[in-house]
Amino acid sequence: MPRATKIVATLGPASSSPEVLERMIRAGVDVVRMNFSHGKAQDHIDRATLVREIAKRCGKEVAIMADLQGPKIRIGKFDGDKTMLVVGQSFVLDGATTALGTNERVGLDYKELPRDVRAGDILLLNDGLLKLVVDAVRGDEVHTTVVVGGELSNNKGINKAGGGLTAPALTAKDMDDIKTAMSFQCEYLAVSFPKTATDMEMARQLANVAGEPWRHKPQLIAKIERSEAIPVLDQILKASDGIMVARGDLAVEVGNAAVPALQKRMIKMAREMDRVVITATQMMESMIVNPVPTRAEVSDVANAVLDGTDAVMLSAETAAGKYPVETIEMMASICVEAENAEEIALDASFTNKTFARIDQSIAMGALFTAYHLGCKAILALTESGSTALWMSRHRIHVPIYGLTSQVRSQRRMALYRNVTPMLMPNFSDRDQALAEAEALLVQSGVLDPGDTYAITCGEPMGHPGGTNMLKVCRVA
């Protein structure tokens, strides 16, 4: 069986050379993430071109996810690049100053902070490692007392415990970056810090307009990292094609202890609403500098797989770490072991589900049939990839092969759990298409003579959303 859980790897200085990138793709990368918080537009365009070239050389289509920076909710810079904050000392966050910071105060990239906080609020800096309590707000100055001290360096992030910062999800930079991402037709666009469905709807409108010259519409991923997003998660999911469980900033806002349960809830909701879900942040953090992960990291990855995540994501591990290829190999092996341990059964959510669409009903019928007949594979002939997506929302341990004539759909399906996307010619004749599909899977070594498989397609052929036929076949 192929690995069901997909791997998203972030590109950076450690993974930009053609040699390392090729080894990463061969080791199991399904989606590459381009972090628009770093680098210039041309850097991303060049990397996208390189990814396409090397993926082709490897005989594998890899999806590209452009990850927008979002609002810069950060402090300014220090004289000497850093300072040390001591518990009990006073410290001022000054929205008016442009001078370099000292041990007593520092400027703000996020000028709205004085309007967003009041006395008694807790501010968390540098991913929650430092804690300040707000004493008073005087004009553009936020006067605080250090509760948890430590080293504070340039441009570290600011979070408010419990959320409540008013920064918009999409900045002017993000809007420019969307145009860049559409110029190389990224399959997925990740939106940072959305608070409402409206943030996602605005991003989709901007992306669709920017992609119009190429007739390209990307899939949108909402990064859930603000506490305000949790109560309206269902609305954000409806406005998105998937979500990312962005555990870093989310943990700072809601508290570390709340994140594991939220992760499980988000993965479950996404699957129930036919959306994809990526679990991210510090999954193999120790492998930035060590050749092996900690036991806790192994368990973390395995638990995300057992929760049903579509993909697990690597950030600094592959962008700046010493062992990018080894990290991917290790993550892939953990995913396979966890998948082998899954208990597979058609759950109540499957058997009690009702369907208004013919294509969805056919997809569910294929799963039910393949599960009970013990089919070797399910073959979904799909133009858009939707049939394969619906099938992938349920765990039955029968590999799904998404067969499409559209390269864009092939790349998009690279993120779907338990789906192996494959390119095949477009046939107008149904019987010819079914014969070609079987021949492709036999040639690929997936099917052998005597194997049973389920196959879905639509008549007439070649129309997105037209899946209306399920057939069970045995290889002669």
Image: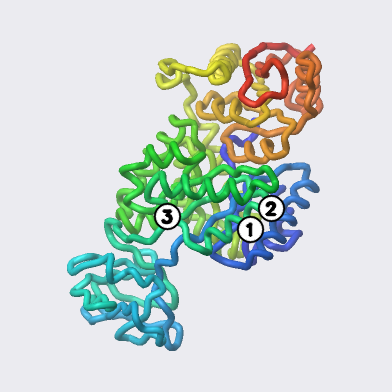
Of badges 1 and 3, nearer the viewer stands 1
Residue wearing tag 1: 180
Number of the label disc, if any, that sits on residue 193 = 3
Between the C-alphas of marks 2 and 3, the distance is: 24 Å
The quadrant holding residue 436 is: top right
Quadrant containing the N terminus is top right
In this rendering, does residue 440 appear at all? yes
Q: Amino acid at mark 2?
A: Phe
Rendered view: 208 above or below 435: below
Q: Residues within 10 Å of mark 3 (few under 14, many from 20)?
A: many
Q: Secondary structure at mark 2?
A: loop
Quadrant containing the C terminus is top right
Left or right of 106, for residue 459: right
- Residue 65, image x, y percentages: 59, 50
Rendered view: 213 above or below 346: below
Residue wearing tag 2: 184
- Residue 56, image x, y percentages: 78, 46
Residue positioned 59% across, 32% down in the render: 418
Q: Secondary structure at mark 3?
A: loop
Residue positioned 52% across, 46% down in the render: 204
- Residue 222, image x, y percentages: 47, 47
Q: Are marks 2 and 1 in contact (CB under 8 Å)?
A: yes
